[in-house]
Amino acid sequence: MNFKIFKPLLLIIFSLYTQFSYAEILKPNISILPSEVVKIQLSGLQKNNMPKEDYGIMQTWEFAHPKNKIFTGPYDKFKAMIKKDSYSILINHKAHEINEIFINENIATYEVIILGKDKKFYKFKWQVEKYNKDGPLKGCWLTTAVLAPKILGSSV
């Protein structure tokens, strides 16, 4: 068998597999740590339209705590809030840093520093909680609050 013939075909198959597997929204599960929840959401928002439009917002919504979804949902309302309010800074931001402020067995709070597209730094307070009710989300860490940002300064 001549590997040179199959090599381009294998590369195409691998490329398609990688694209499709990357396009899948990550679902909450008990193995995802609280800091990873924040990182998953921020990474999605940083590349919001990759691999498809508003992928990052969809990914962020997936890890929103049900009690948070009551106030920010349904999804279309959440998407509008992210795009229009002070949270729009998160869309396609240049960089982020996550610093743990507090953690116990049920709540974790983080300070998140964002370098926005406008080359200004912003600080958010991000809180996740472990879901303790019965059901498929039991034991999963989910976002309960993201406080409006404070401007820290410019990178220029």
Image (cartoon, grey):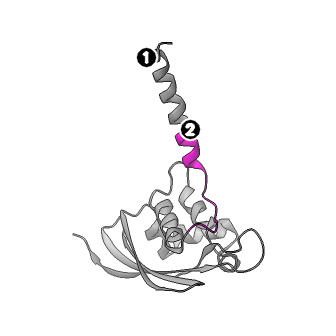
Is residue 72 highlighted in magenta?
no
Instruction: Identify which residue is drawn at 52% across, 82% down.
Output: 108
User: In terms of secondary structure, where does tag 1 sit?
Assistant: helix
- Disc count in the image? 2
Whole-percent x, y for residue 55 in the image: 56, 56
Residue at coordinates 21% horizontally, 69% vertically from top-left? 156
- Please provide the residue range marked out in magenta: 18-32
Question: Which amino acid, by three-letter code, is at mark 2?
Answer: Tyr
Nearest to the eye among marks 1 and 2: give it.
1
Name the one closer to the observer, 116 or 136: 136
Residue 17: mark in rendering: 2
Residue 51 falls left or right of residue 62: left
Report whether residue 148 is seen: no
Locate residue 77 relative to residue 2 in the image: left or right: right
Magenta stretch containing residue 21, yes or no? Answer: yes
Inspect the image, locate mark 1, and give the three-letter code of the amino acid beneath it: Lys
- In the picture shown, does residue 112 fall above or below 101? above
Find residue 4 and name its label: 1
Residue 4 seen from this side: yes
Residue 8, percent from left and from top? 46, 23
Say which of 88 and 28 sits in front. Answer: 28
Provide the major secondary structure of the magenta segment: loop
SS class, disc 2: helix
